[in-house]
Image (cartoon, rainbow, N blue to C red):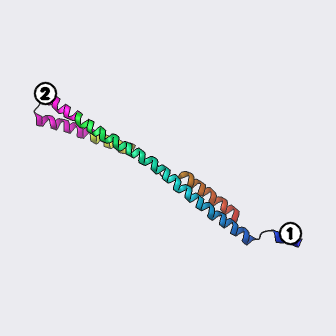
Amino acid sequence: MFDTLQRRPGVVTLATDAISQAADLIQIEMKLARAEVTEKLVAFKSGLYLLIAGAVLSLAALFLILQALVALLVANGVPPHWAVLIVAGATALTGIALVVAGRDRLNLIELTPERTLNALSRDGRLAKEKLT
């Protein structure tokens, strides 16, 4: 009977083991969070580069189209200064409308490591249950 009592770990040993395991688990979860955020940032960065390249090329094409519109107006008898003002005004109004519409629809990439936060929350509940 006395041998049975000595083989069982005590409360202090169990608590120490639980705290040690919780600390290990937190370190692992932090590494997972770091990896998840890095993964999302790499995807965001590559998408951003493509977006910038597309925007630069689109701006160049738009500039050429606007020049062609000015030339078309001048060829149809509109004085050059008025042709430039007409095209610039129409372009500014279109740009403002697009900015307002885009601002309302803008959806940023979520960088929060949701899987890791959920896992940490679950692990915290489990650790609490073990300690109580």
- Point out residue 16 in the picture as x, y percentages from the top left corner: 69, 69
- Residue 108 appears anywhere in the view: no
Q: Which residue is mark 1?
A: 4
- Point out residue 130 in the picture as x, y percentages from the top left corner: 70, 62
Disc number for residue 75? 2
- Eyeballing the image, is 25 above or below 13? above
Mark 2: which amino acid?
Answer: Ala
Near mark 2 (Cα within 10 A), the count class, few <14, some 14-19 or many ≥20, is: few
Residue 29 as seen in the image, left or right of residue 46: right
Disc number for residue 125? none
How far apart, in angstroms, are the residues tagged by discs 2 and 1? 105 Å
Give the total of numbered labels.
2
Q: Which residues are magenta?
A: 65-94
Residue 5 lies in the magenta-colored region: no
Near mark 1 (Cα within 10 A), the count class, few <14, some 14-19 or many ≥20, is: few
Q: Secondary structure at mark 1?
A: helix
Residue at (63, 63) in percent of width and height: 24
Residue 68 as seen in the image, left or right of residue 132: left
Residue 15 as seen in the image, left or right of residue 107: right
Residue 93 lies in the magenta-colored region: yes
Q: Tell me the quarter of the image containing the C terminus.
A: bottom right
- Residue furthest to the right in view is 1
